[in-house]
Image (cartoon, rainbow, N blue to C red):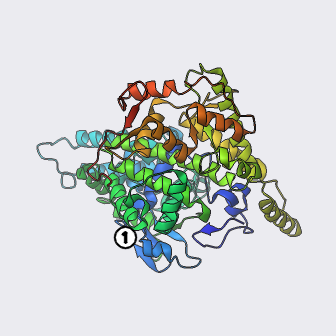
Amino acid sequence: MVEHFPPIDREMFKKGGEDRNPAVQLFGRRFFADQTVPELLVEFLLVASSEKRIGETVLTRDQVLPGVDILQRWPEKAHLEYAVKARLNLKLFAFLGASKLETRHETHRQHYRQLISALKDPKTLVVSGVTNGTEVLRTLGNLFLGLQGVGGDRTWCAQSFLPITRELIAGESIWRETRAKASDVQDWDAALDFFSHSQKIFLSRGGELLYLQVCNALRQDASTIKAWCDQAGLSPSTREYTPELLHNALQTGISSILDSCPEAVGKLASFIDTGVDPKTAERTDKDLGGKPRFIRCGWCPVESWPEGLLFAIELLRLCEAAIDPIERLELIEIACAMQVLRSLCAQSARYVEWARERKGSASVLSFVWAISDPEGSNTVVKQISRRCVNANQRMIYEAIRHPDIIKVLDQQERKDRAQGRVWRDPYREADGRYGYKLFLTLAKRIGLIIPKRGAGARFVLNDKLLRYLVMSVIRPGERVSYETFKDLVFAHYGIALDDEKIARACEWCGTSRLTTLGGNSDRWVMEMLDAAGVLVRLSDSCSLVVNPFDGEGKAS
């Protein structure tokens, strides 16, 4: 079985235990097809910005990451737990008016009216030079509705804000409508008992798993990290391969994301949520004993630390780039999605025999994504890319059918049948929502695979993905040769752009190496880089790719 971090007890034979799923057993708890790309980022930052607990150790909200000493001496069987805030009043204020009529329970409407009435009180919300409280509230309502991140078609409480400040990041709340109707709920105080804050429906643990991967990478020795980077052909700075220095830089970088919004927006959000009705927050954010309500994270594979390290380095470079805060969030969303895709392939390659045998033709993580030009004008590369998509899906499919996983499932089946429970084949759901179809679905969402519907799926790059690659594999303010850039994206993501690497992709897919690609299969890449203003042509045979977004924390 896959060794896991943190070293918690697995939910293998527990009724409803997530670890029963064969894909979860391999990839960790859990990546899930129903979680959108923005929600991966929201959940990642939710963990980072919340109060956390590891055994007896409590971390304040300002401590984005556990200390390296804690990570390296993790208590046995201790979960990573984090205390989420529901922010029901703020969500009600921002989202109720724009939600579907059928999702608005009468008690929600009642409390909304009470909240608006209390905020209209001149003694409650004082705005200099303004006497019309209704106009002020309408403006504030439009402001926070404009910060809606995802979930516009859901019940208001299941929606999320753009995570531009700590005070807008909230946990998942689900309104249990059927139970509320059966109990004939009449007021808000009673209605609070019918909100679930522990279900994982939309924030489905993907962000938690990404956070754990970063923590897992920071547990490694600097010598181990440096040796792996040398093998991969990477040249990280001292700060990027030294866990203590990388930890401190990430702590600062992620905190800067959480504090990038004007302070007034956070204060307004906090006031609307708790200023006139602190009791709702007390009921939703604390347990019956009045202590913070903690949620337990799952686990990630210990052996996945290399991809976790790459993710941490990429995050740091995006955090320190001198770009617009909203654009930064969009790029970090892409980083989260790309990390899920990379994790699925890298972990699968460790457990599939043919992938291990062909690792000499692949990237350091033992997989390849052969990229074709967006227009599909190079027919040969287009076919290779399609073959590569199929090979990656097949690898994921076979990996979750590893003999060790099948053995565990056989044990589960015998136990279930002995106890009179109906046995259901877990592979249909594993393939569709956790495995190779998750890979295909998520890659299509970010434009890495086209078309979105129909046959002939192939890898491509759009402008946003290429911009992301430049900013994540090159440190802010630095430049590398075009050839080095292609080597870096191959090392980070197995992305094959030129003739030589696409020929290697053929071998990795199980076909003969092609030598007739023409020598210009990556011309479109240079044209896109040139159009983006990040290509410096020194001569006909030599060009540089530059990351011009030089942040204050430029790496040495």
Asked if residue 290 shows in the view, the reply is no
Q: Where is residue 4? Give x, y as percent.
A: 62, 67
Furthest residue toward left: 129
How dense is the environment of label 1, judged by Cα within 10 Å: few (below 14), some, or many (20 and up)?
Answer: some
**Compared to 403, does 520 lie above or below?**
above
Q: Where is residue 409? Give x, y as percent.
A: 80, 62
Relative to 407, 69 lies left or right: left
Relative to 249, 70 lies left or right: right
Residue at 39% across, 68% down: 244
**Compared to 279, does 203 lie above or below?**
above
The C terminus lies in quadrant: bottom left
Q: Secondary structure at mark 1?
A: loop
Q: Nearer the viewer, residue 396 or 100?
A: 396
Q: Where is residue 111? Give x, y as percent.
A: 40, 52
Residue at 41% across, 58% down: 240
Q: Nearer the viewer, residue 495 or 360?
A: 360
Answer with the quarter of the image where residue 46 lies.
bottom left
Relative to 443, 187 lies left or right: left
* Amino acid residing under circle 1: Thr
Q: Where is residue 20? Give x, y as percent.
A: 73, 62
Residue at 30% across, 54% down: 259
The residue tagged 1 is 60
